[in-house]
Amino acid sequence: MRREELLDAAEDLLCDQGSQALTLAAVAERAGCSKGGLLYHFSSKEALIKGMVERLIEDFDQLIAAQGHDTYTKNYLAATFAAVQSGTLRRWAVVTGASGNLYLLAPLRVAMARWHREGLGSETDPAAAQIVRLACEGLWDVATHDPDLYDDDHYAELKRRLLDLLPA
C-alpha cells in the first residue's frame, strides 16, 4: 500500500508544481514519510518515474479490459472517456516527469504503439478505428491542459460522434 501512496504523491506533485518540483525529498514530504522510507521502495528519482509509467500502463490496460464492448477500439474509446471524465489524468503528469529521459519513456512508447495497433486486423474499418484512437489521444491532451473545458453532456456528444465513425 505504501508504494501506491508514494506514486500518488509523486503524481500529485507533478500535477501541482511541475517536473522541477519532483525530488525524492518533496515526494517523501508530500507522502508523509521519511526519505529513507521512500528510498526503500524507489532507489532513485528515475525508479520513481519508472514506477509511475508502469502503473499508468497497467491501470489503462485494466480499464480497457473492463469495458466489455465488441471491439478493442470501442473499449479503448470507453476507457479514455472513463479516465478523462473521472479526472484520472495521470498520463500528462507521468510524461512530464519522464520527458527528460528517453529510457524512462520507452515503456510508454511501447504501450502506445500496442494500444494503437491492438485488434486493428479484426476491425471492420481499420482506418476509422485508427482515427477514433487518435482522437482519444487528442482528448487526453486537451483535457489534461483544461480539465473543465467540457461538461458531461459535451463528452457524451463527443463519444457518440466518435462511435458513429465506427461501423456497427
Image (cartoon, helix red, strand yellow):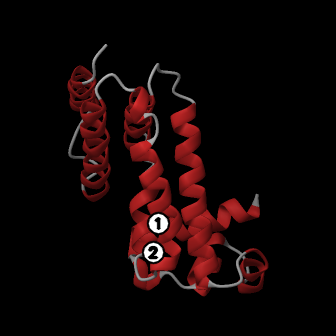
* Residue 19 higher or lower than 160, as above or below: below
Residue 7 falls in image quadrant: bottom right
Q: Position of residue 3 (x, y in %)?
A: 72, 64
Q: Nearer the viewer, residue 108 or 20?
A: 108
Q: Which residue: 43% across, 54% down?
A: 112
Q: On the image, numbered disc 1 is attached to which residue?
A: 94
Q: Position of residue 52 (x, y in %)?
A: 57, 65
Left or right position of 11 against 29: left
Other residues around mark 2 within 10 Å, as few (<14) / some (14–19) / many (≥20): many
Q: Which residue: 44% across, 62% down?
A: 109
Q: On the image, numbered disc 2 is attached to which residue?
A: 97
User: What SS does tag 2 mark?
Assistant: helix
User: What SS does tag 1 mark?
Assistant: helix
Q: Nearer the viewer, residue 87 or 157?
A: 157
Q: Position of residue 2 (x, y in %)?
A: 75, 63
Q: If the image is split into quadrants, where does the C terminus sit?
A: top left
**Farthest top residue?**
168
Q: Nearer the viewer, residue 6 or 132?
A: 132
Distance between the Cα atoms at labels 1 and 2? Answer: 5 Å
Residue 131 falls in image quadrant: top left
* Residue 62 higher or lower than 110, as above or below: above
Q: Which residue: 25% across, 42% down?
A: 135
Amino acid type, callout 1: Val
Q: If the image is split into quadrants, where does the N terminus sit?
A: bottom right
Amino acid type, callout 2: Gly
Do the residues bearing badges 1 and 2 touch, measured as CB atoms within 8 Å?
A: yes
